[in-house]
Image (tube, rainbow, N blue to C red):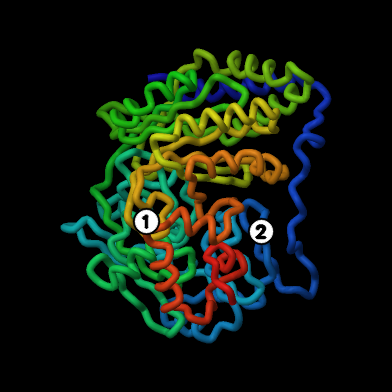
Amino acid sequence: MHNKSQAQISRRTMLKGLAAGAALPLTGCSRNPAAPQLQAPFVPGKPLPWINWGKNHSCYPAQRLAPRNEAQLLEGLVNAKGTVRAVGSSHAFSALVPTDDTLLTTDYLSGLISHDAEKQQAQVWGGTRLHNLGPLLESVGLATVNLPDMDYPSLAGAIATSTHGTGKNFGSLSTQVAGLTLATLDGRLLDVSADRHADIFKAACTHLGALGIVTRVNLQCQPAYQLTEVSQVEPLEQMLAELDQRMAQNRNFELFALPYSPLGISVTTNEASAGDVNQGEDDPGALNQLRQVFESVSWLPGVGESIYAWLLEKAFGGNPPVIRSGASYRVLAHARTTRFCEMEYSIPVEAGPACLREVLATIQKRRLPACFPIEYRHVKGDDIMLSMYQGRDSAVLSIHQFGDLDYRPFFAEIEPIFHRYDGRPHWGKIHTLQAPQLAALYPKHWQDFLAIRESLDPSGKLLNTHLQQVLGVIS
């Protein structure tokens, strides 16, 4: 095995040297305008603002509730004034959370409640952060079947939007839910599962915070296990040509395409073998160094992007793989220290490579200011009402822009490509679709979800402006 820390030092040193050597006047401000100002900066005399992690949404909630138990939660939910929205870790990039009325957090409802070793199930409070979930389950010999690649969200929040990892044999985190408890607006704690209130259960596994507040989650787990991840820079077209084979032969496989470059990064994860050793952690500075190199040369008329591609080949070509090994929850999750905004669409799996190629070609043809790697994953289909993967295996493409830049011009160029491939947007990430377009993407269960929502919240108390628009509910 290669030493990961040496590989990191090599890449970081190379990138820094390239950035310094290409230290030409930066004109990134003209091509990459600053992000729009927050709508709710702190103002003395006003309520303390809430701001999401991406800093693209904010609000002034008049009331903040942090119940310490389910009884307090029910009381607060029933008596709350105006629109009530739940908030977890504030990692949603769409406007699911904002309300100037009542903001409710389940942070105190966190931790492991119980477990069943025979069934390999665990009951967990909904406010539990995913980065705490792994160690909690490990303490009783269990682990999640799969995990998203970032572990900051709360469990209930991740389920709300069908947050997912990667792997053709794995669905989103919502597919691991064996049952959950829903606090409803009429003061009930409603236990739902495939055997109890089955229709509500199918809706609640991607609930958008529109049905009630998820307090408890029963997770179907498996015995704790170890994984080894190997990351390597490779030619992108080679990875796409071998995509089906790599997806079939590895437990988890994903790739990152590098705009303006024929290269990409493969990430292959399998159960650990005897002798596998963890050799380091993620490099939190790599993205910013990549950006520095891009902005140093990309502005040059006619040749900037070609120089950038050449510099990447010099920096990364022939470097050894980077290896991480350890408990599953530590390997599957990756640090996110560089702030960004994100758009993500899921498309039919067979259309994935063509869609990715069109996205990359559009970036190059229109000289879009994009150097953030494009993430490409597969997710197994399910039968959850508003899951992005309902009824079909999916290829998932994630587009990012740095948080201090205006993402809107870039995303506006790319989003129509996803529409042409029958793409479904991630509910927690940026998109522009409204209810009529979204309803057409969910022909099987759209009306079923709306009917269940109305039965649980007939007055629309849980609907903010964004949810009214995407669900087509008129207040």
Can residue 130 be spotted in the picture?
Answer: no
Furthest residue toward left: 118
Q: Mark 1: which secondary structure?
A: helix
Residue drawn 35% across the image and 46% down it:
392
Residue with the mark numbered 1: 174
Residue 397 point in image, percent of width and height: 50, 39
Classify 10 Å Cα crowding around label 1: few (below 14), some (14-19), many (20 and above).
many
Q: Are marks 1 and 2 in contact (CB under 8 Å)?
A: no
Q: Is residue 286 above or below residue 176?
A: above
Residue drawn 73% across the image and 28% down it:
295
Instruction: Give me the disc on residue 79.
Output: none
> Rounded to the nearest whole Å, what is the CA distance between mark 1 and mark 2?
25 Å
The amino acid at mark 1 is Ser
Which residue is nearer to you in this view: 145 or 373?
A: 373
Can residue 385 be spotted in the picture?
Answer: yes
Classify 10 Å Cα crowding around label 2: few (below 14), some (14-19), many (20 and above).
many
Residue with the mark numbered 2: 57
Residue 143 point in image, percent of width and height: 30, 50
Which residue is nearer to you in this view: 398 or 112?
A: 398
Q: Mark 2: which secondary structure?
A: loop
Residue drawn 48% across the image and 63% down it:
208
The amino acid at mark 2 is His
Which residue is nearer to you in this view: 269 or 264?
A: 264
Q: Is residue 164 above or below residue 249?
A: below
Q: Is residue 204 above or below residue 237?
A: below
Q: Quadrant of the N terminus?
A: top left
Residue 409 point in image, percent of width and height: 71, 42
Residue drawn 48% across the image and 81% down it:
458
